[in-house]
Image (cartoon, rainbow, N blue to C red):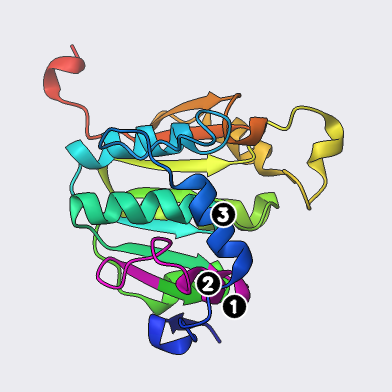
């Protein structure tokens, strides 16, 4: 069974060395309000920080993240900036617990962390409307499609979902331990008429970051 993990569940007096090292390396933010890592620039999650800042500036609603670690630092900073709640889900207890030991990964006022599978996660909470989602958990098509469908149902009009591992640079990356078969969902989404879909092939570890916008209902003057 899945469960919520809070700061009280971990020994925060003992910082997890790997998590602390990553936090100190990544979160040397550029001197602007957008979370953009001075250390890594565009090479890792810089594009996610910039685009998600844009989304939350214009769109009301909370945040969902499937898969915890580096991206959580960006999403937590944005949750605090825009006073939203970020719901973080990961099947591995260690990823969540280790991250809670280092100030900045999560925020006690803006983060809710859930340890368990994403199917359980979506059943566990009565979510509010969601402005922004990020999917980087299981890399097999069947699971990622369920994650996308579950998240899409919660998404406001003009809300966005970002998916990682959608453009493997070679066939060897299609192993489930790398990008898996997420690209199959990306190919399906590109054919849908109820969304806008664009894939950034660079940044995000060079394995593809797909941006999906939920289109609002067509206005009458578009139909003429």
Mark 1: few, some, or many residues within 10 Å (few <14, many ≥20)? some
SS for tag 1?
Answer: helix
Instruction: Find residue 96 and name its label.
Output: 2
Q: Nearer the viewer, residue 149 or 64?
A: 64
Mark 3 / mark 1, whichever is N-terminal? 3
Mark 3 — residue? 22
Q: Where is residue 46 in the image (x, y as percent from the top left)?
A: 46, 34
Q: Distance between the residues labelled 1 and 2?
A: 5 Å
**How many badges with numbers are in the image?**
3
Mark 2 nearby-residue class (10 Å; few <14, some 14–19, many ≥20): many
Q: Do the residues labelled 3 and 1 touch (CB within 8 Å)?
A: no
Q: Can residue 4 be seen from the camera position used here?
A: yes
Q: Residue at x 83, y 46 (%)?
A: 175
Q: What element carries label 2?
A: helix
Nearest the eye: 191 or 18: 18
Q: Which of 99 and 189 is in front in this view?
A: 99
Q: What element carries label 3?
A: helix
Distance (Cα) linking label 3 and label 2: 14 Å
The residue that label 1 is drawn on is 93
Residue at screen point 38% across, 51% down: 75
Q: Residue at x 47, y 31 (%)?
A: 192
Tell me the residue at 80%/40% (across/down). Answer: 174
Instruction: Please say whether residue 102 is one of the residues in the magenta stretch.
Output: yes
Q: Distance between the residues labelled 3 and 1?
A: 18 Å
In the image, residue 102 sits, relative to residue 154, either above or below, namely below
**Residues in magenta?**
90-112
Q: Is residue 148 visible?
A: no
Quadrant where the image shows the N terminus = bottom right
């Amino acid at each position: 069974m899945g469960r919520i993990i809070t700061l009280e569940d971990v020994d925060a007096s003992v910082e997890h060395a790997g998590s602390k090292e990553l936090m100190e390396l990544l979160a040397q933010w550029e001197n602007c309000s957008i979370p953009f890592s001075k250390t890594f620039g565009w090479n890792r999650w810089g594009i996610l920080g910039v685009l998600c800042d844009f989304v939350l500036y214009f769109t009301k609603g909370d945040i969902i993240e499937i898969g915890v670690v580096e991206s959580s630092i960006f999403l937590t900073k944005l949750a605090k900036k825009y006073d939203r709640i970020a719901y973080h889900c990961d099947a591995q207890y260690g990823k969540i617990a280790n991250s809670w030991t280092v100030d900045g990964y999560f925020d006690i006022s803006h983060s809710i962390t859930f340890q368990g599978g994403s199917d359980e996660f979506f059943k566990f909470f009565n979510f509010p409307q969601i402005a922004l989602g990020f999917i980087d958990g299981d890399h097999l098509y069947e699971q990622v499609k369920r994650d996308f469908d579950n998240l899409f149902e919660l998404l406001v009009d003009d809300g966005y979902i970002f998916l990682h591992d959608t453009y493997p640079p070679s066939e060897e990356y299609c192993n489930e331990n790398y990008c898996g078969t997420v690209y199959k969902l990306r190919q399906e989404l590109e054919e849908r008429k109820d969304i806008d879909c664009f894939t950034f092939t660079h940044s995000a570890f060079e394995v593809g970051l797909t941006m999906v916008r939920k289109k609002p209902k067509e206005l009458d003057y578009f139909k003429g």
